């Protein structure tokens, strides 16, 4: 790979998205898709192997929660810039991105040109957001970092608990969630107990309504 090229790892479980982004980003002479991943586990493995400068992480993938995987990639010490990609916006995702000091949160409705420009900007040390997300963050000059304008009630949950909640709210069983997240059923049950206690919700239907209301998932 040419040293002047920005190497990119794309993690998304949709084949059409992977193919489309790979083909599209490779049309820019200074960008090069070094590899792809279809799960969070694979994303961490590929990041360690390929050492890309930028990693695009889809919010919804099999494996550990995306934010847990973001932490793992950061712990590799390869200096990769992490950008969250999603089909929708949620304040809780904004909070997690800022908490982990990720480099951006881009919506899939944005243009390929916007994404390409965002990739260039984050390699230069900038933090980049889609316009709708930018309206919900503010730069704190004292902390020298962006902070969320609005705090979601889900902010009290860990990244892994958010992922478990998303699966619970979509109607998946504890057994199904355990398989998807590579956890034991006992671990999922433990997360479920803690989630419901933290939120004060003890009904699956109400949990689903709450998750939709908070933007964690779309109806």
Image (cartoon, grey):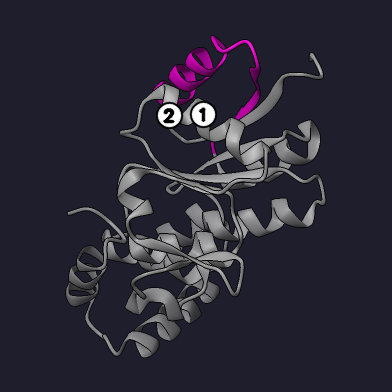
Q: Nearer the viewer, residue 162 or 24?
A: 24
Please give left or right for residue 72 compared with residue 92 in the image. Answer: right
Q: Which residue is mark 2?
A: 114
Residue found at x 43% / y 22%: 113
- Residue 83 pos. (x, y %): 54, 44
Whether the magenta-drawn stretch holds residue 20 is answered as: yes
Residue 130 vertical position relative to residue 95 in the rendered view, above or below = above
Whether the magenta-drawn stretch holds residue 23 is answered as: yes
Q: Nearer the viewer, residue 204 or 174?
A: 204
State how many labels appear. 2
Q: Is residue 123 visible?
A: yes
What span is in magenta?
Answer: 16-38
Residue found at x 53% / y 76%: 186
Q: Is residue 173 visible?
A: no
- Residue 140 pos. (x, y %): 52, 69
Please give left or right for residue 173 compared with residue 159 in the image. Answer: left
- Residue 76 pos. (x, y %): 80, 51
Residue found at x 33% / y 66%: 168
- Quadrant containing the C terminus is bottom left
- Alpha-carbon neighbours of circle 1 within 10 Å: few (<14), some, or many (≥20)? few
Residue found at x 48% / y 77%: 191
- Alpha-carbon neighbours of circle 2 within 10 Å: few (<14), some, or many (≥20)? few
Give the CA separation, mark 2 to mark 1.
Answer: 5 Å
- Per the image, label 1 sits on a secondary structure element best described as helix
Please give left or right for residue 144 compared with residue 194 in the image. Answer: right
Q: Which residue is mark 1?
A: 117
Residue 29 vertical position relative to residue 60 in the rendered view, above or below = above
- Residue 108 pos. (x, y %): 36, 35
Cβ atoms under marks 2 and 1 closer than 8 Å? yes
Q: Which mark is residue 58?
A: none
Residue 96 vertical position relative to residue 16 in the rendered view, above or below = below
- Per the image, label 2 sits on a secondary structure element best described as helix
């Amino acid at each position: 790979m040419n040293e002047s090229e920005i190497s990119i790892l794309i993690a998304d479980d949709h084949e059409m998205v992977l193919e489309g982004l790979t083909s599209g980003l490779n049309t820019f002479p200074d960008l090069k898709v070094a590899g792809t991943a279809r799960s969070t586990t694979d994303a961490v493995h590929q990041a360690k192997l390929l050492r890309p400068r930028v990693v695009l992480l889809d919010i919804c993938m099999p494996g550990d929660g995306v934010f847990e995987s973001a932490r793992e990639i950061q712990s590799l010490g390869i200096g990769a810039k992490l950008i969250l990609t999603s089909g929708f916006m949620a304040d809780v995702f904004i909070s997690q991105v800022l908490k982990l000091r990720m480099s951006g949160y881009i919506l899939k409705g944005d243009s390929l040109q916007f994404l390409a420009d965002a990739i260039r900007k984050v390699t230069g040390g900038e933090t980049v957001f889609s316009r709708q997300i930018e309206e919900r963050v503010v730069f704190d000059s004292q902390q020298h970092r962006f902070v969320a304008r609005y705090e979601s009630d889900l902010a009290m949950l860990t990244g892994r608990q958010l992922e478990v909640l998303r699966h619970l709210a979509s109607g998946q069983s504890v057994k199904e969630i355990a398989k998807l997240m590579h956890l034991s059923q006992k671990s999922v049950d433990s997360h479920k107990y803690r989630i419901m206690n933290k939120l004060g919700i003890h009904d699956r239907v109400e949990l689903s309504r709450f998750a939709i209301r908070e933007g964690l998932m779309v109806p």
